[in-house]
Each structure stands twice: as structure tokens, then as C-alpha cells.
Image (spheres, rainbow, N blue to C red):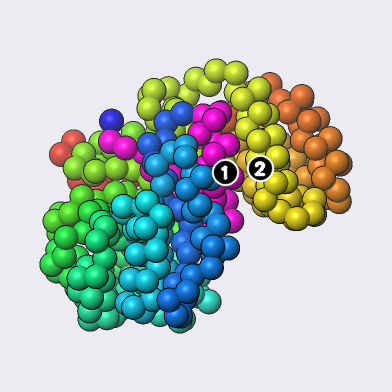
């Protein structure tokens, strides 16, 4: 089995989530952490890297991710992380949010292959560790990735993680599997697939389409269904002790954020955010989400969640074509796409 990698979802897959997940579930081989932004100057405060503190990341292997469009700032931050013990750094060339992209960071850099080229040349001359890239197909159109094939191939990148959407798509619409096939054929480095793996059937279809992929990145689908990696590894939808395990995982999240945040209100807000995804794994998910969002105290929130878990007969049971996923692509016997 090719490795399964936890995606960097800002506000979700932080150290608290990673540690709680590792204690209660299986199947994930490593994580790319949510990005840290490069800063001016050579002094980097410990608070800027709190989520990457080694003593808080001794569970699953973690790769830090940097968001930057300035080579010197990138090098300074990357070398600081290298000194902390991290041997691979990932460069975020995929963040789709307009407030980031308009500043020519994340996916905002993708139309500028010349800038990416110059940055890679300078970074790799002054950074002793391994460098990987997480990218989209472009900011505005999928053909923006094409000039980057030669750029990526010119440098000793450890791997390229591709989310086959454009930045302006955000997370809407279908992933572009034809464009991903081009990436897989034209990029000389190991290529990891990322995007809309929300269900076992979707994974199995993608696996049959792209046997040359070097790894699979799970993001929103795994947050919504923390059993998904186990389902993929085992090739089955069967869940053992699902409700009890989810309850313990949930309590570990609440406890972890209670230690990290100052004040129960911040914990409550963070946990309400998770239910945008958790609710998809439950019967009557929309009604559950409404009840959770109406809670005004952490105590009341715990009561509501306890009642939800007590009333559920199953957890994480998804259909073959989930509402939140893209339709399973039709495939010719030779692996090509229909239509």
C-alpha cells in the first residue's frame, strides 16, 4: 500500500488533532502540517512555531509546510525548522484563499513560473534538508501547471503533491483527473494525489486509474470520517467499536484544545468548526450540526454531543456516491476516462 498522508488543513489538522488521531485511529503514515508563514528578519519567535514543537509532535511523522514568496525569508524559516529536527520542508504553492493568492503566495504564485524557478534555485543552494512542493493546477486555469513541469524537474525535489483544481475553484466543482494524469506523466519526481478522497469507493477508483502515484493525501474526507484511512488500508467499510472510539477521540480533542487555548469559549468555537465535517458521518447530520451550533457553553456542548452519540446506531457509514464527493469517474478497460 502506498503511504496515506494527512493533509494540512489550517484550523483542523494541527498538533492537537494529529496526536488525538494517532492515539485512537490507524492508517495514516505521516502528516504535512498546516502552513507557517515566513516572516521578515532572522528572529523567529517560538510562538510562531508552537504547533511544530518537537515535544508536541512525537506521534506520527510530520513535515512542516511554509507559505512564502521571499527566498531569504523561506531559507531562514526552513533552516530553523531543520535545526528543530525536521528533515523535509514542504512549500505551499496551493493555498486558494484570495487573501493569500492576491499577495502572490500559495496558488497566487502559480502563474509566475519564473519566480518559482528563481526561488527554488536559491532555496536549494542554502537549505540542507529535503524540499517538497504542494501545488494546484494553477490559480486561474489548469494549463498554468504546464510551464512548471520543467521547473520542478530541474531541481531535486523529494516529491510533488498535486491537488487537481485551480485556486479560483477553491474546493468547488470536480477535480480535473485528466490534468492530474498529465502531472503524473510529466513530473519526474514522486507524485502524491490530493483531493476529494471522501470514500473508500472513490479511493479504489483513483487507485485503479493512477497506479504510479507514490502516495495519497487525505484531508476533509478524513476529518469527516476519521475511520477512512483504516477503511482504505483494510479495503472494507466495516468499523469496529466506531461510536466508542469516536467518543474517546472527541474527548481527546476537547481536552487537548482545553490545554492549548485560554478560555472555554475558544475551545467551543474550535469544536463547533469540526462539526462542519463530523456531522457528515452521522445520520441526521444536518440536524445535529444545528444543535451543536446553537450551544453557548462548553458544558452544554458536551451534553449535546453525548446525546448525539448515545442516539446513534452507527457512525461513518457512507454511500458509494457521497453527496459531498465528486461522481465516481467512468473508466475504460485501459484506464482512460470516458467523456
In the displayed structure, would residue 151 be above or below residue 259? Answer: below
Q: Position of residue 164 (x, y in %)?
A: 34, 58
Residue 17: assigned label: 1
Q: CA distance from mark 1 to mark 2?
A: 8 Å
In the displayed structure, would residue 75 be above or below residue 296? Answer: below
Which residue carries the number 2 mark?
A: 256
Of the pair 57 and 302, the residue shown nearer to us:
57
Can you tell which of label 1 and label 2 is closer to the viewer? 2
Q: Seen in the image, is 21 located left or right of residue 279?
A: left
Q: What segment is highlighted magenta in the picture?
A: 2-25
Count residues near mark 2 (Cα–Cα under 10 Å), then give few for <14, some for 14-19, many for 20+: some
Q: Residue at x 38, y 27 (%)?
A: 233
**Could you tell me which secondary element the residue under label 1 belongs to?**
helix
Report if the CB atoms under discs 1 and 2 are less than 8 Å apart. yes
| Farthest-out residue, top | 240
Residue 111 is covered by the magenta coloring: no
Q: Seen in the image, is 100 located left or right of residue 299?
A: left
Residue 143 seen by the camera: no
In the displayed structure, would residue 116 be above or below residue 241? Answer: below
Q: Position of residue 123 (x, y in %)?
A: 26, 71
Q: Position of residue 52 (x, y in %)?
A: 49, 53
Q: Residue at x 62, y 32 (%)?
A: 249
Of the pair 125 and 232, the residue shown nearer to us:
125
Q: Position of residue 308 (x, y in %)?
A: 76, 32
- Locate the N terminus and report the quarter of the image it occupies: top left
Amino acid at each position: 500500500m502506498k503511504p496515506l498522508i494527512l493533509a494540512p488543513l489550517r484550523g483542523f489538522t494541527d498538533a492537537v488533532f494529529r496526536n488525538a488521531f494517532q492515539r485512537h485511529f490507524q492508517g495514516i503514515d505521516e502528516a504535512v502540517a498546516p502552513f507557517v508563514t515566513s516572516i521578515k528578519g532572522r528572529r523567529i519567535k517560538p510562538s510562531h512555531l508552537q504547533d511544530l514543537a518537537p515535544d508536541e509532535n512525537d506521534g506520527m511523522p510530520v513535515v512542516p509546510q511554509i507559505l512564502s514568496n521571499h527566498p531569504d525569508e523561506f531559507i531562514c524559516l526552513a533552516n530553523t525548522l531543520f535545526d528543530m529536527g525536521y528533515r523535509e520542508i514542504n512549500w505551499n504553492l496551493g493555498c486558494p484563499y484570495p487573501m493569500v493568492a492576491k499577495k502572490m503566495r500559495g496558488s497566487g504564485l502559480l502563474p509566475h513560473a519564473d519566480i518559482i524557478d528563481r526561488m527554488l534555485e536559491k532555496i536549494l543552494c542554502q537549505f540542507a534538508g529535503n524540499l517538497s512542493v504542494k501545488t494546484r493546477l494553477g490559480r486561474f486555469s489548469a494549463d498554468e501547471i504546464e510551464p512548471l513541469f520543467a521547473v520542478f524537474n530541474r531541481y531535486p525535489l523529494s516529491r510533488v503533491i498535486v491537488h487537481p483544481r485551480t485556486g479560483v475553484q477553491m474546493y468547488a466543482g470536480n477535480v480535473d483527473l485528466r490534468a492530474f494524469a498529465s502531472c503524473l506523466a510529466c513530473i519526474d519526481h514522486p507524485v502524491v494525489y490530493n483531493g476529494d478522497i471522501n470514500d473508500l469507493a472513490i479511493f479504489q477508483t483513483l487507485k485503479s486509474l493512477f497506479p504510479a502515484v507514490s502516495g495519497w493525501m487525505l484531508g476533509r474526507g478524513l476529518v469527516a470520517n476519521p475511520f477512512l484511512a483504516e477503511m482504505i488500508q483494510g479495503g472494507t467499510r466495516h468499523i469496529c467499536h466506531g461510536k466508542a472510539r469516536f467518543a474517546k477521540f472527541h474527548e481527546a480533542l476537547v481536552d487537548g484544545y482545553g490545554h492549548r487555548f485560554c478560555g472555554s469559549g475558544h475551545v467551543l468555537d474550535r469544536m463547533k468548526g469540526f462539526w462542519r465535517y463530523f456531522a457528515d458521518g452521522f445520520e441526521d447530520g444536518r440536524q445535529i450540526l444545528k444543535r451543536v451550533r446553537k450551544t453557548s457553553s462548553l458544558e452544554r456542548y458536551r451534553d449535546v454531543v453525548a446525546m448525539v452519540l448515545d442516539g446513534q446506531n452507527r457512525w461513518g457509514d457512507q454511500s458509494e456516491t457521497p453527496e459531498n464527493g465528486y461522481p465516481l469517474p467512468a473508466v475504460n478497460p485501459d484506464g482512460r476516462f470516458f467523456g
